[in-house]
Image (tube, rainbow, N blue to C red):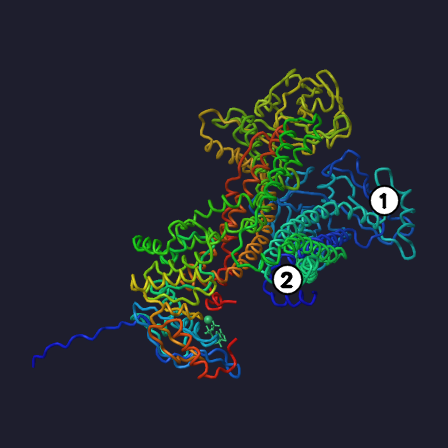
Amino acid sequence: MLRATLKGMAARKARLALTSLAVVLGSAFIAAALVLTASIKTTVDDLNGDSYAGSDVLVQPVEPETAGERHVRDGVPADTLAAVEAADGVADVSATVTWMVNAIDDNGKVLGGFAPTMAVNWGDESVDRELREGRAPESDDEVAVSAQFVADAGLGLGDTVTAYSLSTDETVYDIVGVFGYSGDRDSLAGATELAFTTVEAQRLVFDGRDMYTAVALTAAEGTSAEELLRTIEPLIGDESTAMTWDAYMEETNARAAQTTNLIGYFLLGFGLIAVFVSVFLIANTFTIVIAGRLKEIAMMRAIGASRGQVIRSVLAEALLLGAVASVVGAALGIAAGAGLTTVVANSFLDTGGSSLTVPVSAPIAAIGVGIAVTVLSALAPAVRASRIPPVEAMRSAAKADKPITVPTVAGAIVTAVGVTGIALGLTDSFGSDRTDMLAAAVGAGLVFVGVSLLTAWLSKPLVSLLGLLWSWTFAGKLGRRNASRNPRRTAVTAAALMIGVTLVTATGTLLTSVEKSLASQFEDNIRAELFITGPVTSSVPATFDPEVMDDLREVDGVDAAVDVYYDLAQIDGTEQYVNTSSDLPGIVEQFGGELLEGSMGDIGEDGVAVNEWSANDLGVGVGDTVEATFTRGTEAHELTVVAILADNEETDGWYVSPKYAEEFYTPEPNLGLVDVAEGADVDAVTAEVETLLADEPAVSVQNHEEYLSQLTVFFDYAVIAIQLLLGLAMVVAVIGVINTLILSVLERTRELGMLRAIGMTRGQTVRMVTVESVTIALFGAVLGVGTGLVLGWIVQLALVDSGIDEFAVPTALIAGYLAAAVLVGLLAAIAPAVRASKVNILGAIAYE
Amino acid sequence: MPLATPPAPPIVRNAVTASGLWRAYGSGEAQVVALRDVSVAFASGAFTAIMGPSGSGKSTLMHCLAGLDTTDRGTVNIGDTVLTGLGDKALTKLRRDKIGFIFQQFNLLPTLTAEENILLPASIAGAKADPAWVNRVIATLDLSDRLSHKPTELSGGQQQRVACARALATRPDVVFADEPTGNLDTRSSAEVLGFLRKSVDDFGQTIVMVTHDPSAAAYADRVVFLADGQIVRDLHGPTADSVIDTMRDFENAVPLAGKAA
Ligand SMILES: Nc1ncnc2c1ncn2[C@@H]1O[C@H](COP(=O)(O)OP(=O)(O)OP(=O)(O)O)[C@@H](O)[C@H]1O
Ligand SMILES: [Mg+2]
């Protein structure tokens, strides 16, 4: 029997190649995901290893427990540096001063982007900076810039650059040098650097105090890092802490791993979706291949092969195919992972080289999953094939479709259970929020599975309906009939596309709904027409001179202009958003806030207003006192709650006296609200505000739309990310449709030959196959869009309590998906259509 | 010099003519010559059967005549059209408009109803079949109450009758049938053959049919015998018995190189 299997496989190379493609793709994705994740991790680790490379012990300031990442910190004091420098066993010391700054580019705007702009001290030797042009900064008004800065800011040697930090005003520096990094790199992980004299760097970072961000020590010959650490520890004060470089790396890498693991899960998710979709493809291909071999199987049965032998022969074929295909897939995946690592390393991390790491898990998982999926997918068709009585298969070719009752009934039940779960979950029937959420989530999953099972049943009416689009030509009519000819096959093929489109539509719908809900709450609440604000990505939060506000109030057509200062403060030991303004009642009015108790006027010096939600969170009411420490504050202030605001997305947080602004992270206003008078020309006011802001490089004036789009910019990235997901699903779907069509064309060779013989042209044949292809693809997309919309809607309903109270349909995206489906159909049709049009008429109509 | 115009000779128009056809498959040692210098004409409005042992070249001849296969040498005419040298497009159009086909099996598209199958060639051409004619054909074939059925819901005989109707629906110059009754029982065969005969008698249809069955050949006006790629006998007004006699006669005369399967 095995020999017969092998011979059979050799005779059907084309079909096998198609089946393998699905397996190859699935395993390749898994292998690529694992390799890419591991390699990015090694690359990032190597990158981290660049900092303080070669040192043995690191002295750093103790991080205040309550400080966030962006806290203005203290450094290692100069006397600590002097003490450790003099210690026994220290060979070399390098002291680093570095923190984020804002620099203004050649367009007069603050340099933004995702990688930060850093100030460093040139004297620091813990990083391998290599001067490329000019010289090192020698006086405090000179700066050397990284090559990345030259590229990003459009400024170079001989130009001047304006930079400022939280503690300094805008200062103009002469660019006297341009540097790169070891390995001929322009940047470390894309960051731009400005290197100053140590004194100037300290002015920017520590407000002129003689402090250091870190002190790196190299042990003398014969002294181990641990010994050095023990020597140092008694010498440093309470405000500093020391650790070996190895321990530091471990900590840094562990922190980085949180991000890289996240990327890994994301990629693995892609891989799993590819595998999930491949299951459909493989099962489908085996079903079709076996259908084409019914006679052969029947003949085997007739000459005495048992049912078990039939099953085993199909499974043996699957095993062999799965093994070969997944080995190929694993190899391709590893290669792709290597390629992608290089791309990521060069374009995002700028590491000047990448470290390829192939974890053992990559080939094992890829091959294991590939084989398992293939064999399991072949099981059902194999069992079905073995059940066919020999006589039936020996009979003539025209065989009726198999009934689809079982999947339909199962699908209907699963969908019904799912819908019930969702309904119960959304109506809070279980009493506990967790259980309700779980019920709705499980329900949504079941609906997804149920609809997948129902595709065969849905395919008949839906495919014929969609096919009507092309029925005006006869070839189109035939194509439409062919598409609805085998509902099971059409359904499974379309399901591959449906899965991807469902996922992206659901996410897209949810994101659009969130965006719309935010936007309409914003519109409802906010009274100001114009906002003065900077890019969310600038290294130092954008601020402006509060005096601008006075000029703004003078502008014709401006009713009110309110400045807003933000801080992330510690209130009763928890992190809370704090606002202030020179016009506290004005801020509430502009934000559409509503006072429940007390008045903003009572805040005075030591009062605080708070929105209801935050008050409940801390369990305080009017008259209670709270302890507040602001980011730059050195001591806690006792504040009395004097007013409670109604909950509203915009007024969220605490309101304190403007006198505390100087203890805020940024002591200048971050946001200006401009209320334009009724009937005034908004454009004219905008233009005038713009002129007044000419000297404020960090901020610009924005209308509602611009302001909102900035707040929701991350959604746009999320949408792009899910489009990638769709792209992947599309690739798999194309292969699936090609697979099905080629097999259908092979199966219908006689029919095609007959059609060609009685006068169907090649062009008509091509059109017929193309229509079938496009119809199947559209069917998948339409189902996916439908299911995705429902799932997105359910999640939105579940989030109503969290303020996502509006449902929005991402129409442009959906139109895009449908267009993409048509494209998938067209692409997938090419090979099968050409094949169909080239059918050898004589060969096709020759009798057996 | 005024002369009385002589009476015109009865014009036997030929629907299909072939002259000097050669067709070989393969090359070198393995070469099989399927047709060697075949010249034959099929009269318009006549029912001609082609007979011969298996492998004698009957199907090949038919395919060459119908523009489905190319010839190595010789010419084929369908009506006024010379097939030799025509491209795929022109041949496809010719098959669509001038030729009807009935195959042994796989004649019908399973996705279409009987009626749609009958109208298939017209649909492919994007033309409308003459409804009166189609109705007449359908009535003659006794298919009126089967029109909305799918092929899987029809018996083999009914399927072949639908195929006949399809072949005739466009009023082609000639209908080629390759063993149309090969898969049918005696009764269904008789129905189909009876209809083919009738279509020649009543509608003046030209039919060329390949068959192995002497009693089927007896329905024809003429039987052409092929052996080893050559025409060996030409029998007019056949009966089942005369066909059997002729076959026995030439099978003895022509030694077949052991290729009859
Ligand atoms: N495509 C081909 N390639 C090679 N040889 C062929 C091909 N088609 C036909 N032949 C050969 O040409 C010869 C004539 O074949 P053909 O099919 O015309 O015979 P036939 O008379 O129709 O036989 P049957 O009664 O069995 O249908 C045979 O020897 C056959 O093997
Ligand atoms: Mg033949």
Q: Which mark is residue A56?
A: none
Residue A484, position in %: x, y? 50, 49
Residue found 54% across the figure and 49% down from its top:
A487
State left or right for residue A75 relative to residue A25.
Answer: right
Does mark 2's beta carbon lie closer than 8 Å to ligand 1? no
* CA distance for labels 1 and 2: 82 Å
Give A843 or B206, whichever is nearer the viewer: B206
- Which amino acid, by three-letter code, is at mark 1? Ala
Q: How many marks?
A: 2
Amino acid type shown at disc 2: Ala
Tell which tag, 1 or 2, sits nearer the viewer: 2
Locate the N terminus of chain A by quadrant.
bottom right
Mark 1, Cα crowd under 10 Å, few <14 / some 14-19 / many 20+, is many
Q: Do the residues indicated by labels 1 and 2 lie within the same chain of the protein?
A: yes
Q: Is mark 1 within 8 Å of ligand 1?
A: no
Q: Is residue A101 visible?
A: yes
Instruction: Tell me if mark 2 has few (under 14), some (14-19) or many (20+) residues whose alpha carbon lies within 10 angstroms of its own.
Output: some
Residue furthest to the front: B241
Residue under mark 2: which chain is it in?
A: A
Vertical comparison of A72 with B234: above or below: above
- Residue A343 rendering spot, x and y as whole percentages: 65, 56
The front one of A727 and A600 is: A727
> To which residue does mark 1 refer?
A242
Q: Chain of mark 1?
A: A
Instruction: Classify mark 1: helix, strand or loop.
Output: strand
Query: What percent of the width, then of the height, locates residue A68?
Result: 74, 36
Locate residue B175 relative to residue A170 in the image: left or right.
left
N-term mark: 1 or 2 = 1
Single out the residue that lies furthest toward the left: B1
In the image, which disc is placed on residue A302?
Answer: 2
Up/down of A438 relative to A626, above or below: below
